Image (cartoon, rainbow, N blue to C red):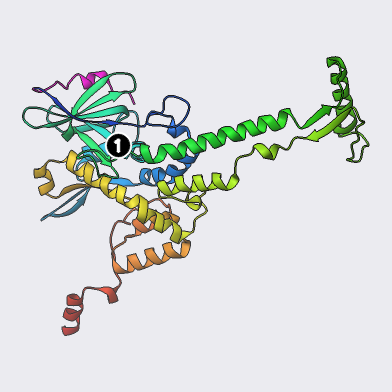
Amino acid sequence: MVINIGILDRFKKENKLVEVSTYKMFTDEGSGFFGYDGNIYKSDVVRSAIRPKVRAIGKAVGKHIRENVEGLKVNPEPYIRFLLEEPNPYMTGQQLQEKLATQLELNNNAFAYINRDNNDMPIEVYPITSTSTQSLTDSRGRLYLRFSLRNGNQVTFRYTDIIHLRKDFNEDDLFGTHPGESLAPLMEIVTTTDQGIVKAIKNSGIIKWLLKFTQTLRPEDQKREVKRFVDDYLNTENDSLGVAATDAKADAVQVEPKDYVPNEKQMDLTTKRIYNFFNTNEKIVASSYNENEWVSYYEGTVEADIIQLSDEFTRKLFTRRERGHGNKIMFESSNLAFASLKTKMDFVNNGIDRGYVNANEGRNVFGMAPIEGGDQYVRRLDTAPVEKQREEVSE
């Protein structure tokens, strides 16, 4: 993603910056084996492993929630709603979320820059794709991040203007632990295996039979004997009935292609280890899961990152004073989209009866458009609050 140069010109270095640490990113450049700067995203195994999670996070809907003494309001400020729906002129909110989720899976770190107006109000959010990131501090102890972009330029932003998602947060004080050391050996096995399969296919297509001549022949005689063998026994239209015969001049030996094919069990084991690394499995990747399997995957893999996304947007878009007045960002994602029809019906019916789901929310579960007046919550009379029931009985 190339950020408008006019935006970058607004940022100047403040005081003297001191380098703290450097973080190297997976990029989509280079060739050969997969490594720290390899083309890991071009691997079909990796891309298929992370795609279900990326799609699930992309479908989460960002909402501005304000809850205070005046009650609860959803999307009370239009500029925040527009920011979540269209974070910048080049992408929608869903695409931004998918971009961040992809970077998070590949690097255990994902970054987005918040552009603010002259009143320090957020107006745009841009994902940052860099080859490396340095954390810097000035003489006042304020934290900055310097990004080396893929076009060779460097940009430096205040950390307070950066949405920073991370996983495996262990060794470094700021960055998530890079997955390269764990993932690169597996990717080398995949690459070597793929190369072996290609070579096996090429070899099997080049040589299928080997004629060993028992006497010395001139090159033209050898070619003539080979052509005669092919015409007589390898032509599908001949009447040899699958039986071939040679005279004493040559021995015919068939070359078996399977001798060149890598171990299939080893290939499956390596693929499974990569899936395990990304907390997924073959059913999730192939979309052949059932309801319970998706719920387990969602709760174990997707939900934690959606919570992190909500918390990070909240603390970076709002000041402490604004958060003190009940402002927060929530990314709402329902795993009911993958539930059975019976589960959806039970949820909607019980929710409407008990007053925690309105008609439009119920229609949304089934992918239906909202209706006028459907935002009103209703409740069955026999599920009214206890105190209200006592008042009605006493009357």
Residue sitting nearer the eye, 168 or 12:
168
Could you tell whether 76 is left or right of 69 in the image?
Answer: right
Check disc 1 and give the amino acid type: Ala
The secondary structure that most of the magenta stretch takes on is loop
Could you tell whether 171 is left or right of 341 in the image?
Answer: left
Q: Secondary structure at mark 1?
A: strand
**Quadrant, the C terminus:** bottom left
In the rendering, at what x and y percent does residue 271 appear? 50, 45
Q: Which residue is most to the front?
A: 215
On screen, residue 273 above or below 12: below
In the rendering, at what x and y percent does residue 162 appear? 21, 34
In the rendering, at what x and y percent does residue 79 appear? 22, 37
Residue in the picture at 82% in, 28% down: 212
**Quadrant, the N terminus:** top left
Residue in the picture at 26% in, 47% down: 308
Could you tell whether 11 is left or right of 253 in the image?
Answer: left
Residue sitting nearer the eye, 319 or 382:
319
Image: magenta residue range: 1-15
Q: Is residue 241 magenta?
A: no
The residue that mark 1 highlights is 110
Q: Which residue is most to the bottom?
A: 394
Label tally: 1
On screen, residue 77 above or below 37: below
Residue sitting nearer the eye, 78 or 18:
18
Quarter of image, res 260: top right
Residue sitting nearer the eye, 258 or 103:
258
* Residue 334 appears in the figure: no
Residue in the picture at 47% in, 61% down: 340
In the rendering, at what x and y percent does residue 174 appear? 21, 38
